[in-house]
Amino acid sequence: MSTTKTFRIGQIVPSSNTTMETEVPLMLQRAIVPDGVGFTFHSSRAPMKTVSKDELTAMNGHMVRCASELIDARMDVIASACLVAIMCQGAGYHRETESSLRAVCKENGMETPIITSAGALIEATKALGAKKIAIITPYVKSLTDLVVRYIEGEGIEVLDAIALEIPDNLEVGAHDPFALVEIVKKLSTHNADAVVLSACVQMPSLAALDTVQRTFDVPVFSTAAATVFEILRALKLPIGVPAAGGLLSGQYG
């Protein structure tokens, strides 16, 4: 059947990110959407190689430029794809980022929905009704602690967090997603309402989400899955992606 509506999905990604331009399209292409709906994918890059607070802060300075580039091609939604870059800036910073990027779109005559992966993780967790979560991150412990503090500042308790201590972002992107099947067994999930298999947009997890979900009675998801969840909500499309964890099972949103 011919496509009758094509949505343009824009992403702002760190220059060394190799995952969001893979996992987000895969999930959206598998999404259970009305006949004739299609997607195209477009990115703008912000410099970042090492996952350190200084580089992450500097990368945030490129967000407005990146949004300006994307809006020239009239995106239907723009997602800023770096969770820790936002969360290491302090409480509520995803709202400030989303506001500044919406302003760029308005200056160009567009009322474009704006998503940050940090905000998506928070909003998706709330959509699940989850009050307590356990997470896995690839970050060094000091950055993981900032992520935990940020999430808890949004009223969500982090019962446990595993930090894999991988500072090089290319190494994060090369991490075997199936390693998470074993790593998650070390995570304390007792009383957790949900499990975040990858609290990072660069650490691949999509290939393992379904496998891990089958071992839990609570939803298992990733930051990439949360971003897709928010993209589908912003576009007012059904939320259902097969084999992509509990968040995208079609039961929520």
Image (cartoon, rainbow, N blue to C red):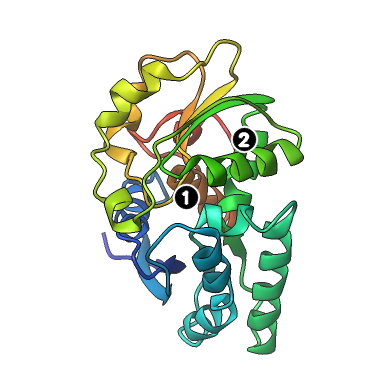
Dot in front, 1 or 2: 2
The residue that mark 1 highlights is: 228
Quadrant of the rendering where the C terminus is positioned? top right
Residue that lies at the very extreme toward the top in this rendered image: 190
The residue that mark 2 highlights is: 125
Amino acid type, label 2: Thr
The answer to which of 177 and 111 lies nearer the viewer is 177
Please determine whether, in this image, residue 241 is positioned above or below residue 237: above
Residue 222 locus on image (x, y percent): 45, 39
Please determine whether, in this image, residue 55 is positioned above or below residue 84: below
Note whether residue 211 is visible.
no
Please determine whether, in this image, residue 28 is positioned above or below residue 102: above
Residue 94 locus on image (x, y percent): 67, 58
Residue at position x 56%, y 44% in the image: 142
Residue at position x 67%, y 65% in the image: 98
Q: How far apart are marks 1 and 2 (CA)?
A: 13 Å
Horizontal side of residue 234 vs 9, given as left or right: right
Q: Give the secondary structure at mark 2.
A: helix
Horizontal side of residue 91 vs 173, given as left or right: right
Amino acid type, label 1: Val
Residue at position x 26%, y 43% in the image: 175
Residue at position x 34%, y 24% in the image: 183
Number of residues whose C-alpha sits closer than 10 Å to that of mark 2, classed few (under 14), some (14–19) or many (20 or more) = many
Residue 239 locus on image (x, y percent): 50, 42
The answer to which of 245 and 179 lies nearer the viewer is 179
The image shows a total of numbered marks equal to 2
Give residue 19's mark: none
Residue 16 locus on image (x, y percent): 34, 65
* Sequence order check, earlier mark of 1 and 2: 2
The answer to which of 71 and 133 lies nearer the viewer is 133
Horizontal side of residue 45 vs 106, given as left or right: left
